Image (tube, grey):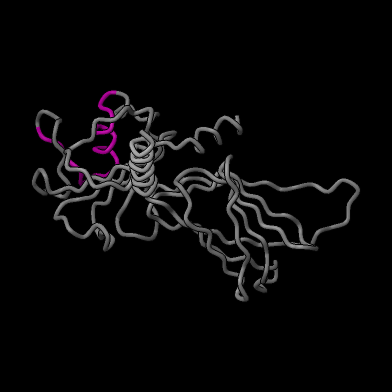
Amino acid sequence: MRKSIHHLLLVAAISLSGLAGAQEFGELHGTVAFDDGTPLEMAAVTAFDGVVVRGTFTDADGRFRIKPLPPGRYTVRCEMLGLQKWVRESVVIYGGQISRLSIVMTEDEVLPNPGLVVTADLDPLIRPDGGTQVTLRYDQLKNMSSFKGGGIRGAIKDMASDIKTDSRGTELYFRGSRNGSTLWFLDGIKIRENVPNIPTSALSSVTVYTGGLPARYGDCTGGVVVIETKSYSEDYYKKQVR
């Protein structure tokens, strides 16, 4: 009996580890400098998603990297003794991509009631790195009329001008490619469905590549669609900021 229980626990652990490793993680890279451009070494940079804090220190050139980070929105803080604390909310991390920040620190003025300046990031529609790509998060997708009427398929069709559908609206064609030549990834897992059947409310973001594909997506003649679903930490973060 004990052996059976141990065996079941082992199988469950292996299954859970496989699911955890399936999701594509992102990275946060950046620089920290004084307001005169001097790089700052040993500045503490942290990323908080509402559940877990991840952080690091800058090197001699003022550079930092925080990884791996599950896709979602983060509050990023930078602190250093004698300088004003820097905070930016809603920094978006995408699966399989690198987000970048340039942080400028200023001297901490001695005031009776010092204030804290908090800024927020806006989601870029087109990112400069990684080929021809467009990324939309659920907050943007839900406002699209095509998303409400056609689900994921309708939204993807309107995300780029070189994505077309057949007469029935059931197939998607990237840059004139044949049906079946597009790669689909759901939380980092390659799938063979033309359009995955998942609830639209579970979406975190949808990224489409129509050209200049990164090396990791190079085995196709059409386009690539990368779908990320919501994580627990992302839902928790949204509830906290409301």
Q: Position of residue 80 (x, y in %)?
A: 73, 62
Q: Nearer the viewer, residue 106 or 218?
A: 218
Residue 17 left/right relative to 150: right
Q: Which residue extends farthest bottom?
A: 60
Q: Which residue extends farthest front?
A: 1
Above or below: residue 182 compared with residue 203: below
Q: Which residues are magenta?
A: 149-166
Q: How many marks?
A: 0
Could you say which quadrant of the image residue 150 lies in? top left
Above or below: residue 175 compared with residue 1: below
Q: Nearer the viewer, residue 85 or 9?
A: 9
Q: Which residue extends farthest top?
A: 149
Q: Quadrant of the C terminus?
A: top right
Could you say which quadrant of the image residue 173 lies in? top left
Q: Nearer the viewer, residue 47 or 84?
A: 47
Q: Position of residue 144 (x, y in %)?
A: 35, 30
Q: Position of residue 207 (x, y in %)?
A: 33, 46
Residue 234 located within the stretch drawn in magenta? no
Q: Which residue extends farthest right?
A: 112
Q: Residue at x 16, y 51 (%)?
A: 222
Q: Residue at x 73, y 55 (%)?
A: 85
Q: Quadrant of the N terminus?
A: top left
Q: Residue at x 36, y 43 (%)?
A: 10
Q: Position of residue 229 (x, y in %)?
A: 38, 37
